[in-house]
Structure formats: C-alpha cells, structure tokens
Amino acid sequence: MASKKKEVQLQTVINNQNLWNEMLLNKGLTVIDVYQAWCGPCKAVQTLFRKLKNELAEDELLHFAVAEADNILTLQPFRDKCEPVFLFCVNGKIISMVRGANAPLINKTIIEIIEDERKIEAGIMVRPELQELVFMEMKDSNACAESRESLEDKYTVAIIKPDAVADGRVEEVKQKIKKAGFVIAAEAERTLSEEQVRDFYNRKAEQPDFEEFVKFMLSGPSHILIISQGKRETTDIPHWTELMDFEPTNESEQEGHGQEPSSLQEALASQQMATLCDIEDSVENASRQLAFFFPEFSKAKKTGLKVEKTLALIRPDLLKKRRDSVLRRIREDGFTIAMEKEIVLTKEQAHSFYKEHENEDFFPVLLEHMTSGPTLALALVRENAVQRWRDLLGPKVVENAKEEKPESLRAQFAVENVAINQLHGSSSLNEAKKELNFFFPCQHTLAIIKPDALPIHKEKILQTVHDSGFIISQMKETHLTREMATQFYKAHEGKEFLNQLVDYMSEGPSMVMILSKNNAVEDWRKLMGPTDPEEAKRISPNSLRAQLATSILKNAVHGSSNKKHAWESIAFLFGDIDLENQSQMQDQFAE
C-alpha cells in the first residue's frame, strides 16, 4: 500500500475536463502522462519523476499529473492509442510532447524547461512567445472531413539522423525550427529498418554513395518530427532543396538584425542543418512517412466510437465441444483477437477472479465448473468492444437468454444439462482492464544482440522482434567491459567456458534491450531457439539462432531464463528503472 500512496502524491489525477482546465493554471511546468482507461498510466518513468521531483521541486515550478484521455475532450486525439504520451504544459500551453517511455528525452526536456522557468522567475529572462502544440484532432465536423491532401499541405516529416541523435543535437535542431515560428506537432525516436530507409529515401537510390547512406541510417535511432507552419502567414513548409541552397548574403543577414527569421530555411541553413536533419520535399514521401510514423495523423475518425479491448472467456464445456464455431462467430462480428490463452484455472485463481460472486448460491457450482478443464481467455478488440460483446452474449441466465434473446451467443451456444452460461464478457472498461491484466499481465525480459551479430544482423533481429509483438521499452548500444561481463555471467562461475564467454562478450559493442509483452520471457526464449545452433536448426528452424548463430558461443542473441533473472539483468544493465506495470495477479500465472 505504501507504493500506491507515493504514486498518488507524485502525480495529480486528472479524469475530467474541469480538472484539466484547473491544471492549466499551474505555475511552472506540468508533465502530463496521457493514458487510456484500459491500460492505465505509464509506470516505466515513475523512478525518473520521483528523482526529478526531489531534485527540482524546491521552488514549486515542477508538477506531475496523469490524465485519462477517455474522459477529457482536449485529449480526444490521444484516445485508442497504446503508446505512452507525455505532454509538457507551461503557462497554460502545451508546448512539447514525447511519445513513448523515452526517459532520457523526457529528463532532458524537463530540465531545460525548468531552467528557463527559473530564469524567467528571477527576472533575468523574458518569457518567449511559445507556440502551443497543435493536436491533429479537428474541433468541428467540417474540419474532421478535411481531406488527406490538405493535411499533407500543412505537415511534413523531418528525420534527424542517427549521428545527430547520438551527439545530443536533437534539441538544437528543434529549437531552430521553433524559433523560426514553426510548430513541432509530434515527435518520436525510432530505429529504421533497411526496407524503410530504402523506401523513404528512394529518391537518392541512384546516387553512388546510397548503400553507404543506408548503412549510416541503420547505425542507430533517428528522431522523427512532424512539422507544421503553425500560425505563420506562409502556407508551405520549405523544401529541403531550399534549405540546402540558402546562403546568407551578408553580415547583416547573418545577424538578422535581431528579427525572427522569415523562413525555416533561413533559420537552419547557416547552422549546416543539412548534415543533421532531412526535411521531406516530396508530398508523396511525406504522406507515406506521416502514415508510418504517426498513423493517427493521417487517418480521420470515421465513427464516433472508440476502439476498445474487452475480455471474453469460453468456459470448459463449450471450449471442448464447439471451440471453432465460437471463434468463427467472434471474427464474423468484426472482433480482432489480439491475445489468447488457454489455461486450467486453480481453485484459488477461479475464486480470486469471481470473488464478487462468493456470497451467491451458484458460486460453488461456478468454481467447480471453471476448474474442470481448460478455459480459453481472449482479448477482443473493435469499436465499442465492451458493449458490443455484452450485447452479443445476451442475458446471463441461460433460460432467459433462450426466451428473451434466442439469437444471442449464450442461447445459441448453451450446453445441454449445464446451468452455467458458457461465455463471459467484461461489464465495463474498468473491469475489462482488470480482467485483461488478470489473464494477460505485461511482462519484461532482457534481450541482447551479441557483438558479432550486431553489425551484420541487427536490422533482421529488430524487425523480427517487432513482428513478434514485442514492445522495445528500452534499447541502448553498450560495450561490456570484462568486469561487467564477468558479473553478468556470474551464474556460470567455475565453468570451463566462462573465460571464453567473457572474452567474446567484451570484444565489441552489444545491443541491450528491454522487451515487453504478455509472456515476454518465454516468448523471447522461443524466438531465440536452443543455445546450440545445430539443435536449433533441427527442432526450431525458424528461430533466430537457427538462422543467425555460428556456434554455441557465438549464438547471436541472449535472453533471460526466467522472470527473476530478467529483473536482475535489467537492473544490472539499465540501473534503477521502474517497469512495474504489471498487476498484482501476475504471479498467479507464473510457471
């Protein structure tokens, strides 16, 4: 209970428009974690926020809040998105945004804003006229119908290249763009795949050094920006060719006479931003990039309904007799099965899940039924999923379902001589969140792309990770010292291969990652395959080690063996990072 209390004190809870409006009156900076009701606030940055609160809170200029997008009209553009979003509010305006739990970027943004606020508070700096961030959600029905073409006219995509990201020059580029009067509407740090680089930069394909350029763009994460002209009179984002061609003609132009630059190219050209940042000059390419990096920007809401997740259970008797028929009916009604798990519940698990019914007469029968064999748990996704699934199910009592709604699933899939209905659905969004956490708790594991595989197979491995449904919560390239490698593999102390393993792991940089998803530890181990690549080829030919490993020692990738090992390894390589976004029910399903 103590940790729960700390969290409430750290972040103000905003769950309606009135509280949002009150938050805008805060003095200084408010950092807002925007979340969905079904998945909850992001816990991965809690440790960072506590640290910053302790270090920077003496003058009460730093505040933290969590805001539920589902209940706040201003946050409508962020509904139905599972990626964490952090907004930065200063003087009643949202001036910056970070997508994803990018702790270094969040930390840097907070420190820079607080430094400016302290200068303003002390009277040594005048508050600049900041452009408020533009959310791509239209405020009226006519605007919602705005065409894709007009959207493309107003927004373009800029890619800050890997070397500039590595050198910490992202903020420098962003400040130049902002000072020129343009608005950064969204941003994200992404590692491009080879296919994406070749697609997005196909206009350069005929250049003699294109292959080298592709390798360069794959060398590390890029920083992606969506730029709009904001409130400027000009209606065009300058093309990159203009940025490269612009040269200040004399000293007075270089100095600018203290005036704001009249264009983005004027702001960037003298700083040689062409070597740091690529601004798309093709509407077609900009549209493609926009759709890939920020799909919510390039698609309008076609209905007023929200995409939701809900839990469905197919109980043991029905699962045994008509599994395929039920699943077919679910898909025919437009549901996507995002996750599924077949599980035999213990008596304790069943009692915990149905605790609200423990005083009902039918509770002992329900427990006996739910523990009699496998149950299939499904995470169903579609618009208005909770209500739609409940409507399909029909009344809870089987006889009532047959009489009042014979077309309902509980009527059609009733099992003869079984009084318990055979299908379960969550009663509300909040219940769906709790129940999904019960059956599908998020889990984290450590993954490493080893030194010899990193320069050759990095992109293939990262693409396989994404395609397999993992979220890369944290990623960094690091060169393990012999001391670090020895400590990391201390479980093998005394084994004859340890020295050879330590030498290998410290011979060059590795890519270390925190991978997150349901059942992450076991799923990553399956994706890696057996330690011996020959055995992997025989029993798991599609695994990474079967395809990429060259020996038992040089077997391309590493993964944690169990949950405890995962947490210890993550702490060793990433330090005090808070990834505690699992429900209290998680351990009930640990193997």
Image (cartoon, rainbow, N blue to C red):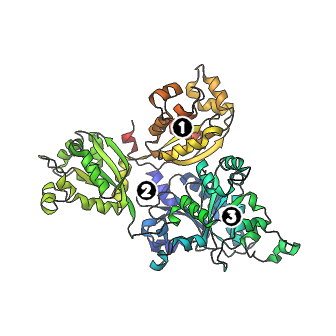
Question: Could you classify mark 1 by the number of other residues whose Cα lies within 10 Å: few (under 14), some (14-19), or many (20 or more)?
Answer: some
Q: Amino acid at mark 2?
A: Cys
Q: Please provide percent x and percent y for residue 345.
A: 29, 41
Q: Which residue is mark 2?
A: 39
Question: Could you classify mark 3 by the number of other residues whose Cα lies within 10 Å: few (under 14), some (14-19), or many (20 or more)?
Answer: some
Q: Please provide percent x and percent y for residue 351.
A: 27, 45
If you read the primary sequence from the N terminus, does the residue marked by circle 1 or circle 3 appear first? 3
Indicate which disc residue 568 carries. 1
Quadrant (top left/top right/bottom left/bottom right) for the C terminus: top left
If you read the primary sequence from the N terminus, does the residue marked by circle 3 or circle 2 appear first? 2
Of residues 292 and 520, the one drawn nearer to the viewer in this rendering: 292
Distance in Å between CA atoms under marks 1 and 3: 37 Å
Q: Place residue 182 in its image quadrant.
A: bottom right
What element does badge 3 sit on? Answer: helix
Q: Which residue is mark 3?
A: 174
Residue 105 in the figure: left or right of residue 438: right
State which mark lies toward you, 3 or 2: 3
Question: Could you classify mark 2 by the number of other residues whose Cα lies within 10 Å: few (under 14), some (14-19), or many (20 or more)?
Answer: some
Residue at image location 35% in from the left, 63% down from the top: 384
If you read the primary sequence from the N terminus, does the residue marked by circle 2 or circle 1 appear first? 2
Q: Is residue 3 above or below residue 17?
A: above
Q: Amino acid at mark 3?
A: Lys
Of residues 500 and 318, the one drawn nearer to the viewer in this rendering: 318
Please say whether residue 532 is visible from this viewpoint. Answer: no
What element does badge 1 sit on? Answer: helix
Q: Is residue 310 above or below residue 183?
A: above
